[in-house]
Image (cartoon, rainbow, N blue to C red):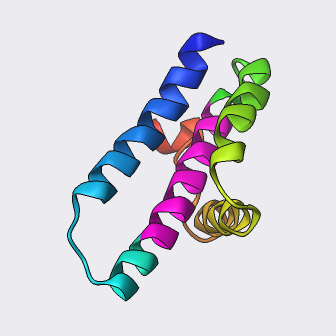
Amino acid sequence: EENIKSWVLDEWEAIQHAFNLMDQAALPRWVRRQKLRCMFAARSKVKMQQMADEKPDHVQRIYKSARPKIPWLHWHLGSISVLLRDVFFGSSIKKEHWE
């Protein structure tokens, strides 16, 4: 449980720390914040995919760790981006891509 939270939340904290170091005007800063939220949601969704076959119980733990950090809209936009990637380019999770 603790490792899952660390795996997910440490990434979020690193993203937040890097964001806070950036010096940008208000509008570009706002846009970047939205993109980072979507990116974190997408990365969390990919982590959930990675764990789905081998450790399905971890999927819910990842979700419960990541989801509260991200607004509803950003979570769904990130999930949609992963879905579109999988549909058009194939999932990087599928083992046949690595054989």
Q: Is residue 63 above or below residue 54?
A: below
Q: Classify residue 67 by image quadrant.
A: top right
> Which residue is at a point 69% across and 19% down the rendered structure image?
54
> Which residue is at a point 64% across and 54% down the rendered structure image?
70
Is 47 situated left or right of 20 in this image?
Answer: right
Q: Which residues are magenta?
A: 33-50
In magenta segment, residue 39: yes
**x and y percent of residue 43 in the render?**
53, 48
Is 10 situated left or right of 77 in this image?
Answer: left
> Which residue is at a point 45% across and 68% down the rendered structure image?
33
- Nearer to us in this view, 4 or 91: 4
In magenta segment, residue 86: no
Is 99 situated left or right of 95 in this image?
Answer: left
Query: What secondary structure is the stretch in magenta mostly built from?
Result: helix
**x and y percent of residue 91 in the render?**
59, 52
**x and y percent of residue 29 in the render?**
36, 76
